[in-house]
Image (cartoon, rainbow, N blue to C red):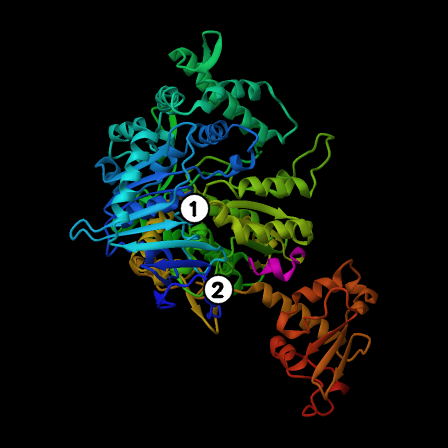
Amino acid sequence: MTTEVQETFGLFEDDVQQLPDFLHVIHNGKVRRYDNYEEIFDSEKYDEIIGTSYSVGYKMINKIISHFSYVDFIVGISDQSYHQKLHDNIHYEVLRHQTKEKYIQQSGVTVFTEMNHKQKKKVLEGRANLKYPKPGVPIHCKFYLLRNSVNGSNRVIFGSANLSVQAFSNNISQFEDIIILDDHEYYEHYLKRYEYIKDNFTTDLIPPSVIRQYQEQEESQPFSGKSIDILKVMKEEVKKDVSDIQTLQTQMKEIIGVPEMIQDKLNYSDKEEHEALNIRKNVTEMMSLMTGMENKKLRFKNNTERTVENKLTKIFYTNTDKQDDDKELKHHRPFLNRWDNRLEINHYNGVFTGIGDKDNVQMEVPFNFFISDEEIIKSIRLIDQMMNSYLDHLRVRNLTAVSRIYEILLYAFTSPFLSYLHANIEEIQPGLNNREIPIFCIIGGAPGSGKTYLLKWINKLTSADKTPPYVSYGAMKGINSEGKEGTIAAIKKYLNVEMRQKNAYPLLVDEIEEKFFTEKSIENLLVHLSNELHLELEGKPFPVLIGTTNSSTYKMDQRATSRFYYLKVDIPFDEKKRVASSKTYKDIFRQTDNQLFRDFLSRYLKMLKETPYRIIESTDNKGTDFLYAAREIFKEYYRIAGLSLPIYFPQSIANDYSMTSREHWRDLFRNYYRNTDYFIYDASRDELTFLKNALYSGNMYNQQGISVYYLEMLPSYVYKQSQGEQSYLITIYGKEFFRWLEIPNPYSKGLKGFLNKKVKF
């Protein structure tokens, strides 16, 4: 929505708005308020965009290519570090960053491989031209030219803002100033300026070799970064870059001294962290590949093809392998990639890829596709057989326990999409935030309740790889250099690496220990990952964690608990039926495959694209059901199979942690509500004082930190938040507390004689 703030432009007029305009816009001489990028870059009014931005993310590049029929854009250098090194040659600093981005991070390759088919087609047809500064050239301009190709109307946008959603938003606390001019003579002036910079100081962002290789690929084979001959691409780029910089050094005298700076840096070593040092060394070696002796002086020059290939091989393979060895983990998960850029209406197969063999070479292959009704019927019947086996062989026949197992299955099937929901929740369901999409699922169960076998079955249902089905918590800790069991630091390192892998397949962890749930540093890490991971990875896929634990060990701070989905499977198998249950499990397991999962992914993608409003259901009384789409898909499977929905099928989200907390508190209150060492009731205020330190004196509660544990289980609205862990007395609101426990107030006057007899509740 555009709002005209004042009729005339005055620099020093008082701001009469209640909220500041972080994005300050002067449009045709008047100050106007714009709330977002789409209002300014109006793709319905204009179909062409030309411009240059000092910094622009690849996600934004894809967005403008999708929204405009013609794009001509210079992608500047996003790194700001060279501005902080004024004592150095600015051209050296720019070249250093360009080399890192272009050769080590291979950004030009990435931006093309992450485009969808329509975006790639625009590039091939010349309707999307992306340029990048030539080696050593800093381009800091920020101006954008929009034009309607039919009626010729145009718009000029210039100012402090880079091309990003963040910069062109009034909802983010970042101050930016821009000027917008419609149908102004400045359009032609800036168009000439753009063409001069583009023709003389830029090169192709997407290497021509990448486009040629894409055109040579068979249409049936998905194109990805793994199918590119990187050496071939980089050999061409080195040759071109050397030619460009040789020409530029005649125009920019400071470039002449850069080769000697490269040699100095190549001989220099410092005490930087190992991985950062490796990257820096690779960048410097890559830069040195463009230099050589000429008339007894170091200059930019072309080396022989053999020298270039040998050096590139060393940089891209030897050093990379060494860095990978340093990071290698003992557990290798199945691989599942999600290519969001391939998601288009009526094109759902192959959006997910796995690893397969072709001509004895491992490569990414299509994973998801729709399957036949016959295969759906076979799969859904096997799932029902497994569920009924659980029901028949538990010590107590319990529908809730089996329903939880089905809920775990729905979570596992949905897990490849949870990173997508984290990044796009506000678009899919306005008003929700990613805290309502838990990326950690904990299965709490008693010993002998089949948690480990459940993880194996989930893996068989969802994976095509011959990798271990799960990792044990002990393996995550590993063994340190002294031969002792690893510490919690090893767990943090493991999670930091694994959770940042661009792999949508879930991390399955067995037998998580109590310390995982009580260690503050782990809690901080999990909260950070839940809040920020989708931002760090810019919306790319990442795994969720599905782990098992003893149900008695799950105790977490409320801050972390709200990011977890806790499901309790707490009834063990009947020992008398163990042989029969094992035989049934093995028989069903042998027949199980991943065909239904492949189909599920395709159906979910279809809903995501065609009916996104059906992905999540949110109601005041039931909360947010982030598995709603999975329930609907499985209901459709039962309709296809001609089967009634089983009574144990979970119809809504579970809240086992809240139920468990309520049970613990109900037991505590039942035992001690008449004991004033524990509880004191004030009828006039309808408040209950809980003397939590009294727990230490009771034999059944004599555990370290038990009072904190009970305090954490209380919902925040039940007690005074000004009190907490350090307070001896906790004031509990009577009405809210008893409503939460789902029991009557035993201190109420309406229950005369209540306290004089044993009460059941």
The mark tally for this picture is 2
Q: Is residue 694 above or below residue 418?
A: below
For the residue carrying disc 1, how many other residues have a C-alpha within 10 Å: few (<14), some (14-19), or many (20+)? many
Q: Residue at x 61, y 79 (%)?
A: 739
Q: Residue at x 29, y 57 (%)?
A: 610
Span colored in magenta: 553-565
In this figure, which residue is indicated by the disc labeled 1?
461
In the foreground, 260 or 196:
196
Q: Is residue 116 above or below residue 616?
A: above
The stretch drawn in magenta includes residue 562? yes
Q: Point out residue 27 in the picture as x, y percentages from the top left corner.
A: 33, 59
Residue at disc 2, secondary structure: loop
Judge left or right: residue 177 versus residue 751: left
In the foreground, 230 or 173:
173
The disc placed on residue 20 is 2
Q: Is residue 733 above or below residue 351?
A: below
Q: Point out residue 191 in the picture as x, y percentages from the top left corner.
A: 27, 42
For the residue carrying disc 2, how many other residues have a C-alpha within 10 Å: few (<14), some (14-19), or many (20+)? few
Q: Is residue 325 above or below residue 267?
A: below
Location of residue 30 by image quarter? bottom left
The disc placed on residue 452 is none
Q: Point out residue 93 in the picture as x, y percentages from the top left corner.
A: 50, 30
Looking at numbered disc 2 in the image, what kind of residue is underneath it? Answer: Pro
Pick out the residue farthest to the right.
697
The stretch drawn in magenta includes residue 528? no
